[in-house]
Amino acid sequence: MFVPELPVATARLRRRVAESVQPDGAVRSPCRSRVLESALLLRLLERTGIESDHHRRVARFLADRLDRAEPLDRLLATIALRHPDDVAEHDTGVLLDRFLQQAPAFLNARKRVLLETVLALLGPPRRALRRPFDPSAFDTGNLHPWAHVQTIALKVASADLTGHGDKIDASEVGMLVDTQQASGVWEGNLLVHLLVLHALVGRPHLDGVLVNGVAKALAHQRVDGGVPFVTDTDTWCAVTAGVALDASGAPMEVRRRIGDHLAARQGMDGGWSYTDAAALADVDDTSVAIEFLHATDPLRYRRTIDCGLRALWSYQGADGGFPTYIAGAPSEACMTAAAVNALSVRAPRHVQRITAARRFLASAQHVDGTFDPDWSRSRYHAIFRALLATDACGPDAYRATVKRALTAVREGQNRDGGWGQQPGDPSDAISTAYALMALCRQGDPRPAARGLEYLLSAQRADGGIDSVPDMLGTRPFLYVIPSLADHFTLLALGHLGNRLAARTRRPSGPRAPGARSAYPSALRAPAPGSTGSRGGGRNTPTQSGERSPA
């Protein structure tokens, strides 16, 4: 039933991903330019009087996107390029409302403040915000460091725009200045870096800080003239490449190279961040790093894995769920699934934690089988990870959760065999890869066979995969890491290849007690003959993406 090209296509893509691994084990795939940061840089160059070839290049980048970017990007570029007459106030409000619906509900207020302040900064000089300055809109309670600094920068900028600079405390300005003491862009986050610089413009005795800050931003100007959201996502690229190579049977030598690289970059707290340039660890990178290291060599990386698991413990909330960045923040379904998948590598030690997290996942699922928005624009990202975290529990424990999730996947398949990010969207390779991994957890091969045909149609002659981007950061802004389409497609092909191989290796008798963990490993095949309520294979990582900082 499956196209015979699967082994050849998998081998070509596996070779491409393996060749992207550097001699030191790093996987580097530069983040592409984005309109949001590029528009902020253009206005910053004008506000500081630093107009040069850099200014002309970023202006060209924005002009090139006036006709072919998404609606919000077109709006930002239009305002930044001084075409306010082309912007209708009513349409702007409607656009912002629709855009904010793509973010988790608990982030809505903060994202609205961000967007409104950015639009004011990009507009005519000293343009006042349409709303009055309200200090309570900039609450920093229980925010992780990136969000905390971003919020203070927005507060200072908003106060200046509305003529309330006297309401800003000197300690708040001092905090922003402190971020500029880093040798490079603070925490690798160009969005926060640019917002901080805008907040500092016009303040006395800070000309040198501004000049140095602009130089740091310009060091990351891309060939197309724009600048990206973050300097890089090298750790996230390494862990996603690693699990994909492991799932698809890549040589140990290349996987161990990645493993040694990751082990050397573990943070002091035991976690991992999305990049070497950042100190703030997160649940997503930490979880997938643990999974990969365990799958590659559980003895070689034993201490590293144990330290990572201890780091994960600190994130779990009273509701059993896990947030992205700091303990006490709202739990998220996708991050909870990621944590379950990591804790399962030492399952007997974590039975209570895993059980509590799975209960949270079941309670967080919507009636239609989906979950709240996460770090991917595709609804199938959280679904496939949640399935991997729940479907290995036995036939009854999470029957309803698994059934709803699989129903959502099957009903979302397009006529061309692929899946789009949301209902009605055209098919894309990354969403199809997510869906295909979910379908490996059930018995009917027909949807998976059609999905595979679509996925292979997206493969280029060099083995790489063409797809729309799906990573979000700061949510719900989209950003692009091209190699992730390769990584998640290879991960899906690895899952499918193992699932098909398992069908030809049915056990001849009952499994011996203790022969397999109660929480089997997601990087390997689902159990032979799985019908959807019982999975096999280990709880494989995302995201993810799509996960991203901020």
Image (cartoon, grey):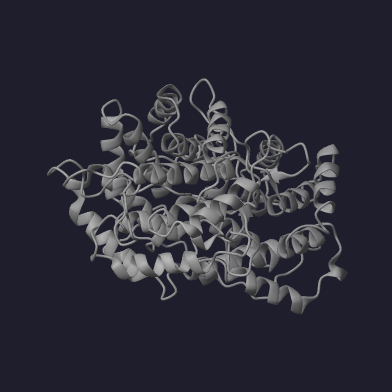
Residue 134 visible in image? yes
Looking at the picture, how far across and down is residue 147, in whole percent? 50, 55
Looking at the picture, how far across and down is residue 402, in whole percent? 35, 65
Between 3 and 30, the one lying in front of the other is: 3
Between 317 and 547, the one lying in front of the other is: 547
Identify the residue at image location x=49%, y=71%: 105
Looking at the picture, how far across and down is residue 314, in whole percent? 28, 50
Identify the residue at image location x=54%, y=24%: 22
Q: Is residue 326 left or right of residue 199?
A: left
Q: In the image, is residue 177 above or below residue 462?
A: below
Residue 320 visible in image? no
Q: Is residue 488 left or right of residue 205?
A: left
Looking at the picture, how far across and down is residue 104, in whole percent? 49, 67
Q: In the image, is residue 422 above or below residue 192?
A: below
Q: How many tags in the picture?
A: 0
Q: Residue furthest left?
A: 513
